[in-house]
Image (cartoon, grey):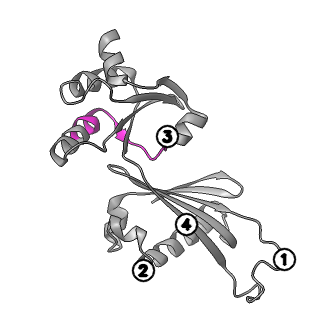
Amino acid sequence: MKMERLSTDKIRIFLTFEDLTERGIQKEDMWKEIPKVRELFNDMMEQAYSELGFEASGPLAVEVITHPAQGMVVIVTKGNLDEGDFPEYDEEELLYEMEVTLEESHLISYTFQDFEHVITVSKLLKKYLSEEEGMLYSYEDQWILQIDSEKFDDNLFHTLIALLSEYGETTSLTQSILEEYGKVIISENAIKVINEHF
């Protein structure tokens, strides 16, 4: 489990599917209210406090985004607690009140240190993907290739993951973060464009 502070009131936590399996949680369990998931969230908040000084108190907005190959990104944002919001609880009883948003992303995101690796993997992917596939971003001196995996069968999905993993690494960066803080290099048809020009 990795975590980073995005602002004074917001953190991002990246969980791999291995992290979940170690705790006996399946991907599908994240959508359910079960004790293991609640325990996982409590552990995440304790770790966020010890590593980042992020104190989870009051209302929290929790956004859970699953990625097919990478795992899950959990974004936790603290809200402001107004007097009288929870009159039935005294301050010591109320640790946090959560509003959870769950999203499932079909985007496979891989980061590459060298543009030559992006070219090489694009040439290999060309024989498996249609020409409309892929988006390419630049973010903090890295290249991020995203591919929508929604229409892939299991065999194709695993083939693509194997090829991408040979040249790059999975990343927890979401499309919204890349669009806000990164630079869009090729907004669509990235595999085709790269193959045509390199």
Q: Which residues are magenta?
A: 162-174
Residue 163 falls in image quadrant: top left
Q: Is residue 18 left or right of residue 10?
A: left
Which residue is tagged 3? Answer: 175
Instruction: Give the mark, 4 or 2, whose residue is nearer the N terminus.
Output: 2
Which residue is tagged 1? Answer: 83
Residue type of the residue flagged with mark 3 = Gln
Query: What residue sits 36% from the left and 16% below the top?
Result: 193
In the rendered image, residue 101, in percent from the top left (x then y), is placed at 53, 62
Q: Is residue 4 left or right of residue 145?
A: right
Which residue is tagged 2? Answer: 34
Q: Are marks 3 and 1 in contact (CB under 8 Å)?
A: no
Residue type of the residue flagged with mark 4 = Val
Magenta stretch contains residue 170: yes
Residue type of the residue flagged with mark 1 = Glu
Q: What distance separates the C-alpha of mark 2 from that of mark 3? A: 29 Å
Is 54 rendered above or below residue 123? below
Q: What distance separates the C-alpha of mark 1 from that of mark 2? A: 30 Å
Of residue 111 and residue 122, the one placed in the foreground of this image is: 122
Instruction: Give the mark, 4 or 1, whose residue is nearer the N terminus.
Output: 1
Which residue is tagged 4? Answer: 100
Label 4's element?
Answer: strand
Q: What distance separates the C-alpha of mark 4 from that of mark 1? A: 22 Å
Q: What distance separates the C-alpha of mark 4 from that of mark 2? A: 14 Å
